[in-house]
Image: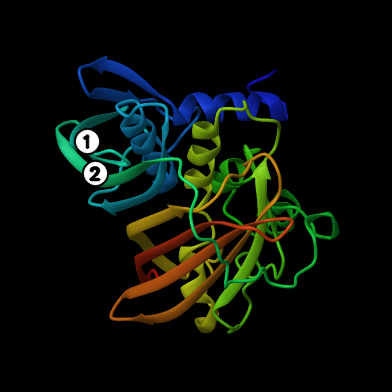
């Protein structure tokens, strides 16, 4: 019964376990398969697991402040992921790690991360949080999924309606109800559906995981295309996250995304992540392949 109808606490416990990695030997680690996963591995999962592997090789007084990743091949949910870490640099303040994620001998992700010992410094924040409704005023992603599920192929509907460990509440609702061209920006609140452990590394992993949600879809908005209608073929090419300040991923965070450019089969997207009190805690950038789907004959 728990598998068929998991509680929020179970969903979050499974997510935390998924985003951690198992030590194999030396600087080699293994990432678990997603429980009930089908098809291609979610890119945010691979990024978060690579970050976890890199963090295992860095002293605890240093926290990740940036990561950069290139997706090489789509990962398969049928297999675990192997992570090999290279300790490229350890200085007085910063450390750098390089990670290759592979499945069955084939690399699927190249990843680098930089870590810093905490220091005080000059402070400013030019970027202000968009003036949008709070999450309490918005429908959940689950509500929106139920609205469109009846229009989907029955074979896809079950997976589409599965409960998820990250709750999303879109301000404009554009990613789901993209019925016509719209400006290339979107705002979404997100958080884990149940409390997370207090370890900051877990909160960074969950943010890295969630940062691959909604972002690529921003460059489809001006063209009125929708994944739910099968109008778009896409894949992430690269992904970067900068962690600026402390946060909790089980409290509401606003993901403000925009897409300044798309052409040549690629779309470029940016994201800013704010706490409810307006602190900018992370920035994200991603380029992806995005093409209009060819109608089936």
Quarter of the figure with residue 41: top left
Left or right: 64 as drawn, with respect to 248: left
Mark 1 or mark 2: whose residue is earlier in sequence: 1
Protein image colouring:
rainbow
Residue 241 lies, with reference to residue 198, above or below; the image says below
- Please give the residue where the numbered disc 2 appears in the rendered image: 108
Quarter of the figure with residue 15: top right
Whether residues under marks 1 and 2 lie with C-beta atoms below 8 angstroms apart, the answer is yes
Residue 199 lies, with reference to residue 192, above or below; the image says above
Quarter of the figure with residue 232: bottom left
Residue 48 lies, with reference to residue 226, above or below; the image says above
Q: Tag 2's secondary structure?
A: strand
Q: Tag 1's secondary structure?
A: strand
Categorize mark 2 by other alpha carbons within 10 Å: few (<14), some (14-19), many (20+). many
- Please give the residue where the numbered disc 1 appears in the rendered image: 102
Quadrant in which the N terminus is drawn: top right
Answer yes or no: is residue 6 visible: no
Question: Looking at the image, which residue sits at the far left?
Answer: 105
Q: Give residue 294's mark.
A: none
**Residue 264, horizontal then vertical, whole percent:** 28, 80
**Residue 12, horizontal then vertical, whole percent:** 62, 29
**Residue 294, horizontal then vertical, whole percent:** 36, 73
> What residue is shown at x 18% (from left), y 34% (from top)?
86
**Residue in the foreground of this view, choosing between 146 and 95:** 95
**Residue 37, horizontal then vertical, whole percent:** 46, 34
Left or right: 66 as drawn, with respect to 203: left
> What residue is shown at x 42% (from left), y 45% (from top)?
42
Question: Looking at the image, which residue sits at the far right?
Answer: 137
């Amino acid at each position: 019964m728990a598998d068929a109808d998991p509680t929020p606490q179970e969903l979050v416990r499974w997510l935390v376990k998924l985003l951690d990695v198992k030590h194999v030997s030396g600087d080699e680690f293994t990432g678990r398969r997603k429980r009930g996963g089908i098809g291609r591995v979610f890119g945010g999962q691979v990024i978060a697991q690579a970050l976890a592997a890199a963090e295992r090789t860095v002293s605890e007084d240093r926290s990740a402040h940036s990561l950069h990743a290139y997706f090489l091949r789509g990962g398969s949910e049928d297999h675990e992921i192997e992570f090999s870490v290279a300790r490229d640099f350890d200085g007085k303040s910063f450390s750098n790690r390089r990670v290759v994620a592979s499945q069955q001998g084939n690399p699927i992700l190249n990843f680098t991360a930089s870590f810093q010992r905490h220091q005080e410094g000059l402070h400013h924040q030019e970027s202000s949080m968009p003036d949008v409704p709070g999450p309490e005023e918005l429908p959940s992603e689950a509500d929106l999924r139920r609205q469109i599920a009846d229009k989907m192929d029955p074979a896809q509907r079950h997976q589409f309606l599965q409960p998820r460990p990250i709750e999303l509440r879109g301000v404009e609702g554009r990613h789901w109800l993209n019925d016509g061209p719209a400006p290339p920006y979107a705002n979404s609140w997100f958080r884990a559906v149940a409390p997370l452990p207090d370890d900051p590394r877990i909160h960074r992993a969950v943010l890295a995981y969630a940062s691959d949600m909604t972002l690529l879809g921003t460059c489809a908005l001006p063209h009125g295309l929708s994944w739910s209608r099968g109008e778009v073929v896409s894949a992430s090419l690269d992904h970067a996250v900068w962690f600026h300040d402390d946060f909790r991923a089980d409290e509401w965070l606003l993901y403000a995304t925009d897409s300044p450019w798309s052409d040549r089969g690629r779309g470029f997207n940016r994201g800013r992540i704010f706490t409810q009190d307006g602190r900018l805690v992370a920035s994200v950038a991603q380029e992806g392949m995005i093409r209009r789907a060819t109608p089936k004959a």
